[in-house]
Each structure stands twice: as structure tokens, then as C-alpha cells.
Amino acid sequence: MPSDNFTSNIIAGKHVPAQSGKTLSITNPATGESLGTFAASSAVDVNAAVKAARSALEGKWARTAPGQRTRILFKAAQLIGERAKDLAVAETKNNGKVLGYVLGEINQAIEDFEFFAGAATKANGIVPPLHGAFFGYTVKEPVGVVAAITPWNYPLMLESWKLAPALAAGCAVVLKPSELTPMTANMLVDILQEAGIPEGVVNVVHGFGSEAGSALVEHPDVNKISFTGGTATGRAIMKAAAATMKRVTLELGGKSPAIVCEDAILNDAVLGSVFSIFYGVGQSCEARSRIYVHESLYDTFVEKFVEAAQKLKIGDPFDKATHLGPLISPERIALMESFVESAKQDGGKVLCGGARLTEDDLSKGNFFAPTVIVDLPESNRCVQEEIFGPIVVISKWKTDAEAIALANGVIYGLAATLWTQNMTRAQSFIRAIKSGIVTVNTPATALPGLPFGGFKQSGLGREMAMETMNAYLETKTVLMNALNKPVNPFGI
Ligand code: NAD
């Protein structure tokens, strides 16, 4: 069972329970076993955390030199590396993702801290050429107190995507991790403090979105919200933020397409596409959950895809042979079943999967088989809505224009993948696809240094890159009189 340090809030550097004494329970999604209880915070806890962040921001932290922040963030990266195994074990228990993949995500968190460690000293302003009567320049200042609100699908990695740039910019943070996956948040923040982040600069409030999350979003002393989660929650947050004009970064849902051209390397396209939908059991915002295959390749592609999907080993996420763990909660199983049912009602054919897995120990967890659906009208909810599970729809196209229209035919625009050997033709697809990220011949979408974020209703703003720094900074323009003459603009 986790210790109190593990399960409490962190406010002003101290581990404290929710003031109401309320807790929330978490469960291992692979086994159904209880993982203990965490603080279930309410507005009073959020107030205390925001107050601690404000006073830390205006205290020592405000006077920390950028180079000092660089050293702290590099140290944090090093400590995360040293504790990677412990962090990964806790994360796998809590969100069910396969241990080896979680270690990869922790590695990305380390790279993110390293990237923003370097960025801390490069938040430069400008000195533009002006009329000779003036001297003007800009300075970048921390935006202030940041509320970082994160989901359950990549807990530690996405917390790092927000904490690293916020700290590099000199902000103070209140982090609210997902109520489903709070287990690694305190471990991460303890590491940051050990690395030299002063007490109160990063605070953690655990709890439900409807209570702790909304109290943070509505708090008048929060200057910026950096949110990753569902599109519906993102809309509500944007509305609430308007009341005090909080800055917002929103990384939201997706329904991303893969386009397979007739000149694609078939094996790469099949295996890359299997990975890009089924990684994390499809519980990824960038999951390529719609695959559009040129009609000349369609039958062979579908046959090979189903064959590959059926080779995936599903089960214990601590077993090295496992490819896919469980879904995060039992409710997701019922949701998957409802998507499959709606596909069937619309004439869709389920070529594999389509149901919960219950053999042996799988019955204890939330396991669902990788599911391939074909012959579905584009209007079906399996094509239009984010499923966030192991369900993919494969369809065919004839002309490039048709493929582009299909790819763009949803409200989302996060990550699209193109499989072709013709890089000239790839350019015309890249220009036409309305998506924050377009990848060519690779399922990968997120590497520190490259902006990550969506067009359309997939979000607002970009993470992981130099431009991310601006989301945590305000620009202050300074304009000075450069003439040594009396000031009398009205000439009176
Ligand atoms: P969610 O929106 O239910 O919850 C995300 C976080 O917001 C949680 O911490 C939750 O407690 C909090 N929250 C919920 N309601 C709130 C409210 N009214 N006010 C403030 N906070 C609130 O999302 P989820 O189910 O945890 O995560 C899945 C979603 O996240 C998917 O839609 C997925 O696409 C998206 N996601 C996007 C990205 C990206 O970078 N674009 C990355 C990962 C996940």
C-alpha cells in the first residue's frame, strides 16, 4: 500500500491530506486489485495550493537566474533517469500500460526536461529598429501561476510536458493529475524538489475534475491553464477561463487518419498502422483510428492487418511478451461494446475482436480485443467520434482528392500519417491535410523539439517545442524616449 507521502497533496512543499479528509480509490486495471486511496481535494485545498504557488512565485523563485533553472531541470532529468524503474512500475500498476512502453515514455519525459532546461536561458525579447526618437525592446516574464491538468493515458510524460516548460519560464504550478492515475505525480514532484525547485513552486492537488479541477479553472489567481484531456472538458475549461481571461493551452481529442497510397511499402504500412492504433490499447490522443487504403491495395492490406492484429499478445503489462494491457476502467468496456454495436447496426463488418477478453486471469481486468471494422459509412460514430480504445475502421479510396476529403472529414485534426514512397506526392497531401502533425512512413508523432498539438477541435497551442515557452511567458514591451529634449507633444 502506498505511504501517506505518496497519496497526499503537496502544498508549499509539505505532504498534506485533503482538508475535508475525503479520499478517492484507485484500482489496478489489469487485476482489479485496490491500489489504495488518494486525497480527494476541494476548493479549500485548491485555494491553499494557489496561495502557496503565488507566494513562491513572488519569493525566491522570481529572483532565480535562468541558468539556475537550467541546472535544476537538468538535475531533475538525471534523477528521473535514476528512478525510472520505480516510476515505471508504479505507472504500469496504475494505468495498465506495458512496462517497457512506460519506460520509453519516461525516457521522453527526461528528454523533455533536458530540452526545456536549455530553453530557460533562451527566452529572448527583441530590440526592433524604431524611429530615432525612441528606443524599444521586449522582455519575457513568467505568465504567473499555472494550473496543469492532466489525463490518465500518459500520466508522468504529460505532466512533464507541462512542468518542464512552465518551470523553465519561471512560473509556479498547481498540478492536478487525473483521479484515475495519481500514483506517479507525487514521486515526480518530490524529485523536482530534490533537484532544487523551491517549496511551493510546484504543488499537487489530487481529486476529481468536477471538484478540484473546476475549482482550479475558476480560481481568480490562476493566470494560465495548461490542459490535456477530452474535447468536451476542453470546451468547458475554455469557457470558464474566459471569466478572468486566463491563458489556455488545450491538448484535446483526436480521430486521426492514416492514408495508405498504392506505392506504399505494404509491410511497413501494415505494421506501422497496427502500432499507431493499438499502442496503449488505442488510448492515445494521436491514435490513427481511421485507415484509408488505396483501392488497389485494400484487400491485401486488410488481410495482412487483421493477421498482424491477431498476433498481438494481450495480458499482464509486466510480462515482457505482452503488447497490450487493459483499458483504464470497466466503464470503457461497455463503451467499446456500444461502438461495435453501432457499427454492426450500420452494416459494418467486424473482422476481428469486437468483444471483451475473459479467458483465465484476463477476466479480472478490463481487457478488450483489438478490433478491425470495415464497410462502414463515414457518418457512423466509429468514424466520427474519438473511441479511445482498440477499434480501427479501414476504408478505401480511389483518387488523392477523395483520400484528402476523407482524412479531413471529422471535427478533429491532431495527427495524420501518410504511407507512400513518392515524396513529391507526399507534399501535396501534407499541404491539404488539416492536422497539427503529419507524419510520413512512421507511426511516431511526438519528439521533444517538434511542436505537438492540434488543428480544429483537437486543441489550442503547442507543446514540447521552443514555441511552447511563449505559452508560459508574457511579453512586456518597453518604450523609451531616446531624445534629450523637453517633452511637449501637444506643443502647448
Ligand atoms: P478528461 O477530460 O476526462 O480529464 C482530463 C483531466 O481533466 C483530469 O485530470 C480530470 O480530472 C480533469 N477534469 C475533468 N473535468 C474537469 C473540469 N470540468 N474542470 C477541470 N478539470 C477537469 O480526459 P481523460 O479521460 O482523462 O483523458 C482522455 C482524453 O485526453 C482523450 O480525449 C484524449 O484524446 C485526450 N488526450 C489528448 C492529448 C493531446 O496531447 N492532444 C494527449 C493525451 C490525451
Image: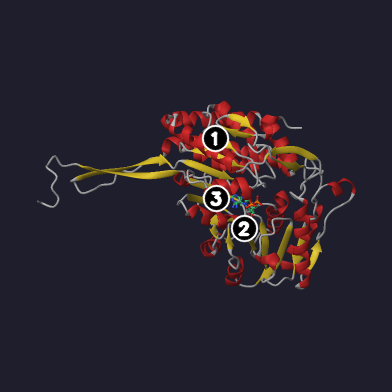
Q: Give percent across and percent down for residue 145.
A: 48, 41
Q: Nearer the viewer, residue 219 or 53?
A: 219
The residue carrying mark 3 is: 452
What is the C-alpha distance between the residues marked 1 and 3?
23 Å
Q: Tell me if mark 3 has few (under 14), some (14-19) or many (20+) residues whose alpha carbon lies within 10 angstroms of its own.
A: many
Name the amino acid type tagged 2. Gly
- Quadrant of the drawing holding the N terminus: top right
Residue 235 location, x and y as percent? 56, 58
Which of the labelled discs sits on residue 254, or is there none? 2
**Helix, strand or loop under label 2:** loop
Q: Is residue 97 above or below residue 292?
A: above
Q: Which residue: 40% across, 40% down?
A: 141
Are discs 1 and 3 less than 8 Å apart at CB? no
- In the rendered image, which quarter is residue 307 located in? bottom right
Tell me which amino acid carries mark 1: Val
Give the mark nearest the N terminus, 3 or 2: 2
In the image, residue 6 sits, relative to residue 381, either above or below, namely above
Amino acid type at mark 3: Phe
Q: Which mark is residue 202?
A: 1
Q: Check the image and name the residue furthest to the front.
A: 20
Q: Is mark 3 within 8 Å of ligand 1?
A: yes
Residue lying at 15% horizontally and 42% vertically, measured from the top left: 483
Residue 306: percent from the left, percent from the top?
78, 60
Q: Nearer the viewer, residue 425 or 383?
A: 383
Q: Residue at x 14, y 39 (%)?
A: 484
Neighbour tally class for label 2: few under 14, some 14-19, many 20 plus, Cα within 10 Å? many
